[in-house]
Every structure is written in structure tokens, then in C-alpha cells.
């Protein structure tokens, strides 16, 4: 074995979305970083849907951006269609989504990585982690090179003992055409980590020249497109449309008669599949009453005719895939360029992690992405940036950076993983966040940019721009509360056109803006003292005033939440000796080792009476400690 001469502060294993964000965070924090991946050509590869964002996921992308990450900027550079979802609903669930040029997204991210001076990028397959005592000191690769590092972040995606299944055929692979990481999985088990199996699947790619687009429903992008990154001023591109078709009775007949061909139905694919993104065969089998399912035909890029069949995730053989596709309108003569497939892989039970994403068993070893049981590029990238930041903080002897559930969707994501765990691929939804009216897409910079600036990942210029923006929001809110509309004919005619009641006395403009029918852009027509403000500021003002009561209520709930989070539990607390605590609770608490009463209360199997008992013991211990201090 040859040991590489250079020693690193941070070694990142895996060049997917988690690995990219982890590498960039650590190197931008001035840590000597190594990114090692099995394929340099597939850095930031979108192995499934060539898109970023969507419901629940876009909040993560905006938060990554506010912390100084790269995903939002990269999709702004390489997107080919941008849409805002849920525009008819409230701001808590509105979400941008963008189709990416798959090839350019990958090339652009690699270019960003290669420009970093403190970052080395190497191609090799990692087979073993090297541990000394209870701390990791490096990794060993397939070609016999040992790299030493003060910390290691594993972001291995679906590569741990990855197995592709397509009909009755199966073969080892981390992704189609790439080797799996079998020995690394064995190495993790050897150090005592508990692993299990998950599975997921991808849809086929099709040749656009064989699609009759005139028979499909065209879906254009928004004009103008909404950027993901707070640093992107505007996006000027020619957007490419997506298209919509549907499964039908003929499609369902083909699928039903061939269910025995799918490893996802027969059980040949071990591990649990994603509940919220099932294969087309699982949807047909599970919901026989549903007559049709949406199928989106999405372009893979500007310079290719290949398209992605979103909604047709499958583990069928190629022959059955093409038979089923050809039953759908517009796809009667379609040809497959790349068949879909199912893949199963090892993951590490995330309850073995601290909230910093460091493993409890082995010091300085961090895990991020699908290795923790998540699905999705956005979920992976969010864990990657947090692991990268925390790896550097660990080296520097500083407290870990932990976002709580009231601060960010990232906080919800990580807390769910390390506290509740998962037995199926975890996907982020807005419904998982208790405080989603506070954790909106539009205000991620207000919530998190201060942290990105603190860690050196966000420039002073960007931070000060953010501060000015929200100062302008507050100033405009104060002005609207003082300014009044008079019950003139002009004012009441406007209100009538908007479908809302007229006014009979002078009314604060802020009260008018609280009406559902009135938008800020309407208000300026009768606002004699109006000021010129940006669309971002106007949006912030409108949301703050329209949802003022709801926001205040959530803020009161957050204060109660924070009181429980502040009640810390000593790391060496022995739950086994706590009399009156149920055995199940003792086992769960000893296993997860919650850092606070708040986290303890969210553990499955720990009930309110257990928490009350724990609070009594902690208070008793605190009093005893104070008395001893006085005697001393």
C-alpha cells in the first residue's frame, strides 16, 4: 500500500450533489480538501430527473444558496425552463422548479469545483475507511493508495453494494455503467455501523424525433423566469417547453399482464421503495380504480433530442417498457434511448448520527446524502453543505453548526433523520415542517445568510445587500401602516374592480393590502406617497402584511419550541438508571442520545409522560449541582 504524501483536512468521498456541496463548503472555509470520485466525468450527474426544485425541495435549494452553496447558482446558469408551482396558493407552499440541461449542469459544476485552489479532485474507487481507535484517519482506494485526512465525509449515493434490476436481469452497479462500492459497504459494517437496503427506480429516456409532440399538451415556462439564487439578478434565456400525456386503459393492460416481470412487484428488489415516488407498475397495482396517470415528457438539454419520461419510473424489461409507452398518445412510434431500471443499495441507519451528521461511533466521520436514507438531489446537497461546514468546525475545535426545525427546512430534514430515522427513502415535503409559513422560499436569505457570512461562504457585499433589502421591507410596512386611503370615487372604483368591498372612512393602506383580493401592485395605483422599491421588497411587504396574524402565531409557537430545545441533556446521561421510565423509552433514548428535551420529545416511542419524568430528573440534578457549588 502506498500512502499519498499530502494530508488533507477534509476528504469527501463521492462527487454527487452531496459531495459537491460538502467539498465547496470545506474548501471555501480554507480547509485543504480532497474530493475523490469513481468518475470525474459524472460529477454532479443527474442520474434521475434533470430538474431542480419543486414542492418542499425548492426551500432546501434556497437555503443552500443562503448558506453559500452552489446548487441554486448552477441551475440558474444551466436551466432550460423555469416555473413557479402553486402560484394560486399561499407563499408557504409556493415553489420554483427548473428543468436543467443535464450535460451542462454537470460541466458547470465541475468547472466551479476545479477553480477552487484548496481543492484536489481525483478519480478512484474508495474501498476502505481507515480508523485508529475511535477516530477516522483516512481512506484506502481500489488501486492501493491511502489518503490521510483529519475528517472524512462519505457521500456515496446509491453506490454501496448497488445492484441494478431490469425485468429478470440484474447486475452490480452504482449507477448504469458505473462500478458499485461493495468493499466500502463491508468496511462500514466492520466498524460497527448498522446498514440496510433501500431501492428506487428511474424512467426510460426516449428519442424526441420519434415523439408526435402535436398530440401532447404543451407546458411552457414562466415569463419572466424566477431565479433560484438570491445573487442572480435575472435570467435571460430561450425556454424550452415540456409536454404532458397520460397513461390509459391500454397502458394499464400491458402493465397488469406483465407485473410478474417487475422485480419491484415480485420482491426480487430487496429493501423498501420510495413511498411518494413509486414505479408506474406499483401505481397501477396499488390504485386500480384510477383510469390514468400523468406522464411528463421533459427535454434533457438544448443540444440533444433525448427526453426524460417523468412519471414512468419502472423496473420492467426494456421490451415491456417500450410496449407500454407506445400505448400512450403521442408516443405510438417512440424509441427508447436508455431504458429505465430499478436499483437497490445499502444505506446507514441515520439515527447513528449526531445532528452535525458526524457518526456517534467513529469520531470525525461524517455521512451525507443517500447514504443516510434520503432521496433527491436537493436533500443530498443540503446534507452535503452541512457536513462540509461541520467537518471544518470539528477540526478547528468549534461547536457544530446545527439548524433547528424553526430555522430551516434543512433543520427539519436532519432532525427527522437523526431523531426518527427512516426505513424508506426520505423525501422532503412542506407538510414535514411545523413552521412552514416562517420557512418560506422567499425569505431563506433573511433566515440563513448570516450563517453563510459567518463561515466565509457568503461575501460581505451579499450580506449587506440582504440587510438593506429587509430594512426596506420594514420601512415600507411602517409607511403603509401610517398612510391612509380616503373613500374617494377613484379608490372605491379600484376596490370594486378587484372584487372587494369599498371603504366608507379613511383606511390604512396596510389594512387594504391584507385583503386577499388586493395586491401590492394594485395598491400603488392609489398610493399618493408611493416609493420606488424592488419586486423582492414588494413581495416581502405583501407577505408580511397579508399573513401578519398567522406569522405572529407561529412565532409564539417557535418560542415554546425553543424553550424545550434549550433544555440540554448531558451527553453522559444514563437513561437506564432512570426509575419509572418505560423500557422502550430507555432503549430509544440510550440509542439516539438526544441533545435536548425537544429532540427527546420527537423520538418515536417516547411519550409525554416519559418527557415529564425526564424533566423532573434533570431539574433535580441541576439543583443538586447548584447546592454542591455553593458548599464548595
Image: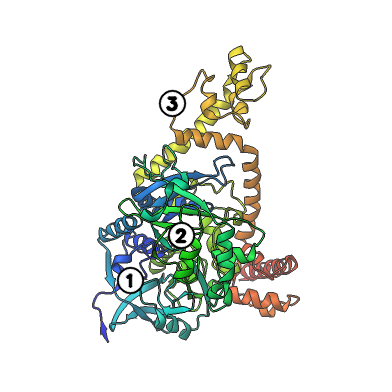
Residue at point 33%, 49% (across, down): 77
Residue 237's place in the image compared with 338, above or below, is: above
Mark 1 = which residue?
A: 37
Could you say where residue 490 lies in the image, as x and y percent from the top left?
58, 14
Instruction: Tell me, for residue 532, which label it has, or none.
Output: 3
- As helix, strand or loop, the secondary structure at mark 1 comes to strand
- As helix, strand or loop, the secondary structure at mark 3 comes to loop
10 Å neighbourhood of mark 3: few (<14), some, or many (≥20)? few
Q: Earlier in the sequence, mark 3 or mark 2?
A: 2
Could you say where residue 460 lies in the image, as x and y percent from the top left?
35, 46
- Which quadrant does the N terminus fall into? bottom left
Could you say where residue 519 lies in the image, as x and y percent from the top left?
56, 30
Residue at point 56%, 66% (across, down): 255
In the image, farthest residue toward the top:
489
Is 211 situated left or right of 408 in this image? left
- As helix, strand or loop, the secondary structure at mark 2 comes to helix
Amino acid at each position: 500500500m502506498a500512502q499519498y504524501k499530502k494530508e488533507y483536512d477534509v476528504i469527501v468521498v463521492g462527487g454527487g450533489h452531496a459531495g459537491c456541496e460538502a467539498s465547496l463548503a470545506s474548501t471555501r472555509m480554507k480547509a485543504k480538501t480532497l474530493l475523490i470520485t469513481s468518475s470525474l466525468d459524472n460529477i454532479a450527474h443527474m442520474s434521475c430527473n434533470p430538474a431542480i426544485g419543486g414542492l418542499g425541495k425548492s426551500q432546501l435549494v434556497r437555503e443552500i444558496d443562503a448558506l453559500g452553496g452552489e446548487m441554486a447558482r448552477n441551475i440558474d446558469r444551466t436551466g432550460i425552463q423555469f416555473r413557479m408551482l402553486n402560484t394560486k396558493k399561499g407563499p408557504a407552499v409556493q415553489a420554483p422548479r427548473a428543468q436543467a440541461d443535464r450535460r451542462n449542469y454537470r460541466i458547470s459544476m465541475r468547472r466551479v469545483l476545479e477553480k477552487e485552489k484548496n481543492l484536489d479532485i481525483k478519480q478512484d474507487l474508495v474501498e476502505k475507511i481507515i480508523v485508529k481507535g475511535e477516530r477516522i484517519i483516512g481512506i484506502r482506494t481500489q488501486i492501493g493508495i491511502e489518503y490521510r485526512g483529519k475528517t472524512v465525509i462519505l457521500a456515496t449515493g446509491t453506490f454501496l453494494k448497488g445492484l441494478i434490476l431490469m425485468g429478470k436481469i440484474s447486475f452490480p452497479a452504482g449507477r448504469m455503467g458505473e462500478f458499485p462500492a461493495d468493499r466500502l459497504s463491508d468496511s462500514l459494517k466492520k466498524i460497527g455501523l448498522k446498514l440496510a437496503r433501500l431501492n428506487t427506480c428511474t424512467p426510460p429516456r426516449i428519442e424526441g424525433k420519434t415523439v408526435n409532440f402535436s398530440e401532447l399538451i404543451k407546458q411552457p415556462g414562466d415569463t419572466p423566469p424566477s431565479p433560484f439564487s438570491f445573487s442572480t439578478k435575472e435570467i435571460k434565456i430561450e425556454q424550452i417547453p415540456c409536454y404532458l400525456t397520460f397513461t390509459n386503459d391500454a397502458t394499464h393492460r400491458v402493465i397488469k399482464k406483465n407485473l410478474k416481470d417487475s422485480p419491484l412487484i415480485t420482491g426480487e428488489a430487496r429493501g423498501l421503495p420510495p413511498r411518494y415516488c413509486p414505479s408506474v407498475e406499483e401505481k397501477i397495482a396499488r390504485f386500480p380504480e384510477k383510469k390514468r396517470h400523468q406522464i411528463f415528457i421533459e427535454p434533457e438539454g438544448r443540444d440533444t433530442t433525448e427526453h426524460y419520461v417523468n412519471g414512468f419510473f419502472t423496473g420492467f424489461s426494456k421490451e415491456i417498457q417500450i410496449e407500454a409507452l407506445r400505448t400512450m398518445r403521442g408516443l405510438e412510434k417512440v424509441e427508447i434511448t436508455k431504458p429505465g431500471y430499478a436499483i437497490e443499495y445499502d444505506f446507514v441507519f441515520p439515527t447513528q448520527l449526531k445532528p452535525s451528521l458526524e457518526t456517534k461511533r467513529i469520531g470525525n466521520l461524517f455521512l451525507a446524502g443517500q447514504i443516510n436514507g434520503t432521496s433527491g438531489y436537493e436533500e443530498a446537497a443540503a446534507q452535503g453543505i452541512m457536513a462540509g461546514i461541520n467537518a471544518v468546525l470539528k477540526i478547528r475545535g468549534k461547536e457544530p453548526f446545527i439548524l433547528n426545525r424553526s430555522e430551516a427546512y434543512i433543520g427539519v430534514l436532519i432532525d427527522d433523520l437523526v431523531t426518527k430515522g427512516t426505513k424508506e427513502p426520505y423525501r422532503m415535503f412542506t407538510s414535514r415542517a411545523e413552521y412552514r409559513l416562517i420557512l418560506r422560499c422567499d425569505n431563506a436569505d433573511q433566515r440563513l445568510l448570516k450563517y453563510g457570512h459567518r463561515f466565509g461562504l457568503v461575501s460581505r457585499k451579499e450580506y449587506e445587500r440582504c440587510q438593506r433589502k429587509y430594512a426596506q421591507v420594514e420601512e415600507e410596512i411602517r409607511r403603509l401602516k401610517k398612510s391612509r386611503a380616503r373613500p374617494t370615487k377613484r379608490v372605491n372604483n379600484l376596490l370594486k374592480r378587484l372584487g372587494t368591498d369599498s371603504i366608507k372612512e379613511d383606511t390604512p393602506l396596510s389594512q387594504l393590502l391584507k385583503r386577499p383580493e388586493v395586491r401590492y401592485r394594485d395598491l400603488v395605483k392609489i398610493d399618493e406617497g408611493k416609493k420606488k422599491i424592488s419586486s423582492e421588497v414588494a413581495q416581502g411587504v405583501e407577505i408580511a402584511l397579508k399573513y401578519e396574524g398567522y406569522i405572529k402565531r407561529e412565532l409564539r409557537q417557535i418560542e415554546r419550541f425553543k424553550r424545550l430545545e434549550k433544555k440540554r441533556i448531558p451527553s453522559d446521561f444514563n437513561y437506564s438508571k432512570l426509575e419509572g421510565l418505560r423500557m422502550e423509552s430507555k432503549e430509544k433514548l440510550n440509542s439516539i442520545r438526544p441533545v435536548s428535551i425537544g429532540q427527546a420529545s420527537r423520538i418515536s416511542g417516547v411519550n409525554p409522560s416519559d418527557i415529564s419524568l425526564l424533566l423532573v430528573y434533570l431539574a433535580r440534578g441541576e439543583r443538586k449541582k447548584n447546592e454542591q457549588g455553593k458548599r464548595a
